[in-house]
Image (tube, rainbow, N blue to C red):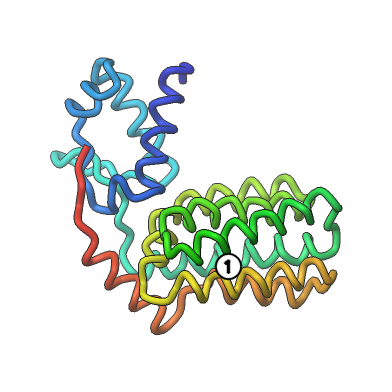
Amino acid sequence: MTKGAIGMKEQLEDDIAVGRLSPGARLDEASLAARFGVSRTPIREMLRQLAAQGLVELRPYRGAIVSLPDPRRLMEMFEVMAELEAMCGRLAARRLSDPHEAELIDNLQACANAAERGDPDAYYFENERFHRAIYQASGNAFLAEQALLLHKRLAPFRRLQLRVRNRMGLSQREHEGIVAAIVAGDPEEAADALRAHVAVQSERFADLVASLDMEPRRTA
């Protein structure tokens, strides 16, 4: 893939992750080609790459849409994400370095500032940085890579959760517990806190599905 094609793909990934393109939105090749100033050939290749990541579905005779997994599949993905993050937290508590601790605390404060302002978009951005800092603090590059891949896949749905009433404040309190456990060097507490933070169960999952159904579909 050329540098230009990588840039287009990253822009579309960002549009999906931050919700400019909602799950279920149709991706029109002609519109994308006009937006990026290219022919449809690199657009088709980019959509194939996004489909391989699971961000896009290619449907015969209907073109591409932003992936909209069924509720059971979505639950399964969150279950795996919860275990990956628990592993990252466990290792981070055992291996935390001074620079990683400083980064975690800075990220925690940035999340707190966004939560205090009641700004879900800013909180989402800082929340992404917070979780990636935990992946890096694990000291396991392969684990961090796998966690980041699934994190990107679930980014649109994690973002939607933050729009559920009171979720942002609760998320921030969970962040505080996670950092406390990691800094205290308590691997199991850190793992349990991250697992509970990421897992989507019962009422929270119902809230997520409801917010997903209500989210307006946008096209590109």
Q: How many marks?
A: 1
Q: Toward the viewer: 140 or 7?
A: 7
Residue 166 vs 107, above or below: the answer is below
Is residue 136 rendered to the left or right of residue 185? left
Left or right of residue 113, residue 4 in this image: left
What amino acid type is highlighted by mark number 1? Ala
Residue 42: percent from the left, percent from the top?
Answer: 33, 20
Q: Identify whether 54 is placed above or below 198.
A: above
Q: Tell me what residue is drawn at x 19 percent, y 28 percent.
A: 31
Camera-nearest residue between 14 and 188? 14
**Left or right, 85 with reference to 15:** right
Foreground: 126 or 182?
126
The residue where tag 1 is placed is 82
Going by the image, does 100 lie left or right of 78?
A: right
Q: Secondary structure at mark 1?
A: helix
Q: Residue at x 30, y 45 (%)?
A: 20
Picture coordinates of residue 217, whole percent (x, y): 20, 52
Residue at 41% from the left image edge and 40% from the top image edge: 14
Looking at this view, is 77 or 34 the one in front? 34
The quadrant of the image that shows the C terminus is: top left
The residue that appears at 27% across and 41% down in the rendered structure is 58
Crowdedness near tag 1: few (<14), some (14–19) or many (≥20) residues, C-alpha within 10 Å:
many
148 versus 74 height, above or below: above
